[in-house]
Amino acid sequence: MPEGHTLHRLANLHRRLFARRPVRVSSPQGRFAGSAALLDGEVLTTSEAHGKHLFHRYGADRVVHVHLGLYGTFVERELPAPEPVGQLRMRLVGETHFADLRGPTACELLTGAEARAIRARLGPDPLRRDGDPDRVWQRISRSRSPLATLLMDQAVIAGVGNVYRAELLFRHGLDPRLPGRALDRETWDAMWADLVVLMRDGVRRNRIDTVRPEHDPRRRGERGRVDRHGGEVYVYRRAGMACLVCGTEVRHATHAARNLFWCPTCQPARGGPEG
């Protein structure tokens, strides 16, 4: 599933290509056809992201809400657009480009109030100007749940997925199973600031890079990471490989039905059983 930086990158791109101009909206697949007909020819006011959710705004009270889920993709190209092929949920056509949406978990037309209700259920987003680390801290500091659970809870903090979770915990030397209430405020403030920098870099580069220069294997003449997510990382999907910092074998476990990666030496256990 795309992490939050991907949705912010899409929002920025769609603002640049389509915003403040009339757009043609269609649903070749048919599942969004009624809503598309209402929007066709209207001005796309703006696009924005909150966590893993994308919002296209039309006027004061029409909002297209998109959640890509596991399989959704947006593809943007220059005009002319080819004939639609396959399960194309929504096509957006502007003056110079078009965008095709396939396979999303959600693509729905909402009122402004309904869109605000979705956002109200989400935690603060590190990539938004209104992202409030104090709100996240209030939830984390009172919770017995492990940090690995809390960081993936979109109601606690929006936009963090499995990659950023694993890498953030490694970069701050934290046991993924440490209860939230055992975290100190100074460490949380450093984590939030780090997450803002990492995710902004993800928006800019369209990949997740978390390895500090002094630990980058390419600087030692070794092969860089080869993975569909791109970027150099410390522990994510590196189970059984040597930690880039200490050489210990990176561990893997299943946590809340998701893969968890960590280095037992750099992230020593401080609470909870080993998984």
Image: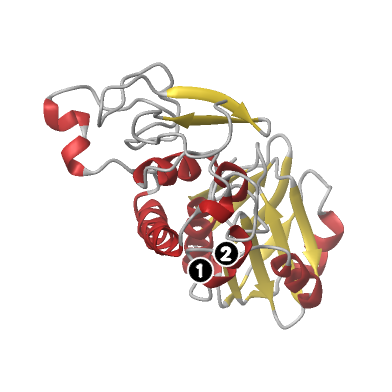
Is residue 95 visible in the rendered structure shown here?
no
Classify residue 142 as left or right of residue 40: left
- Foreground of the two, 96 or 206: 206
Under mark 1, the amino acid is Pro
Which residue in the protein does label 2 denote?
136
- Foreground of the two, 204 or 145: 145
All told, the count of numbered labels is 2
Is residue 99 visible in the rendered structure shown here?
yes
Give the residue at x 40% y 58%: 187
Which residue in the protein does label 1 denote?
133
Q: Residue furthest right?
A: 34
Q: Residue furthest bottom?
A: 60
Q: Is residue 197 above or below residue 59?
A: above
- Report the colour scheme: secondary structure
Classify residue 207 as left or right of residue 29: left
| Secondary structure of residue under mark 1 | helix
Q: Which percent across, then down, holds residue 274?
A: 54, 27
Give the residue at x 59% y 70%: 135
Image quadrant where one finds the N terminus: top right
Image quadrant where one finds the C terminus: top right
Q: Which percent across, then down, holds residue 90?
A: 71, 51
Q: Which percent across, then down, holds residue 193?
A: 38, 63
Q: Residue furthest top?
A: 240
- State which quadrant residue 260 falls in: top right
Q: CA distance from mark 1 to mark 2?
A: 5 Å
